[in-house]
Image (cartoon, grey):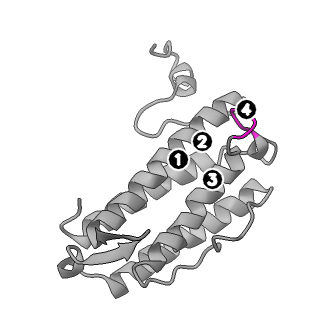
Amino acid sequence: MYCKLQDFIVDFQQESEHTLKIFHHLTNESLSTRVYPEGRTLGTIAWHITKTIPEMSSYLNIEVEGPKESDPPPDNSNEIIAEYEKAAKSLLSEIPKKINDSMLDEEIEIYHEKWQLKSILYSLIKHEIHHRAQITILMRQAGLFVPGVYGPSKEEWKQYGMEPQE
């Protein structure tokens, strides 16, 4: 959890860079990839990550530029990237105007429950990480290059002239 808003800001900036690193390897063709017939597509999950930034921020009374919950996923990966970048930058710009360290323990109603503000911020990041991991699986199935986030990916080990770890 966060004791200082600046800790969230640093985490969000880093995780946003990781998300964009992944998003930049998506192709328009890959957006329709899914694991099973009823499952979400790669594009739907990427769009879900993007839409969650303004959606969760609204509970904090922070107006963030970005897609609305009802906006359908684009069929263009560059559009998803542009909307994600806009939402992430907007959040980082607006959050210090509305929240300070002394507010982090305050409770807010979200999803019909009371959550501490610091829990909402923590969940926003963990939610993104969770879905980003799903995206990397779908990327492999789509035959895309999967970049490493917290260490080298299988593809990157090969680029380094090393055998991928099992």
Give the residues drawn in magenta, as a range: 33-38
Whether residue 146 is visible here, answered yes or no, is no
Residue that carries the numbered disc 3 in the rendered image? 46
| Residue depicted at 53% across the width and 23% down the height | 154
Residue that carries the numbered disc 1 in the rendered image? 131
User: Looking at numbered disc 1 in the image, what kind of residue is underneath it?
Assistant: His
Residue that carries the numbered disc 2 in the rendered image? 135
Q: Would you call the spot at circle 2 few (<14 residues within 10 Å), some (14-19), or many (20 or more)?
A: many
| Residue depicted at 34% across the width and 81% down the height | 96
- From the image, state whether disc 1 or disc 4 is nearer to you: 1
**First in sequence: mark 1 or mark 3?**
3
Tell me if 21 is positioned left or right of 30 in this view. left
Q: Where is residue 119 in the image (x, y as percent from the top left)?
A: 30, 64
Q: Where is residue 54 in the image (x, y as percent from the top left)?
A: 53, 73
**The disc label shown at residue 142, or none:** 4
Q: Distance between the Cα atoms at labels 2 and 1?
A: 6 Å
Q: Are marks 2 and 3 in contact (CB under 8 Å)?
A: yes
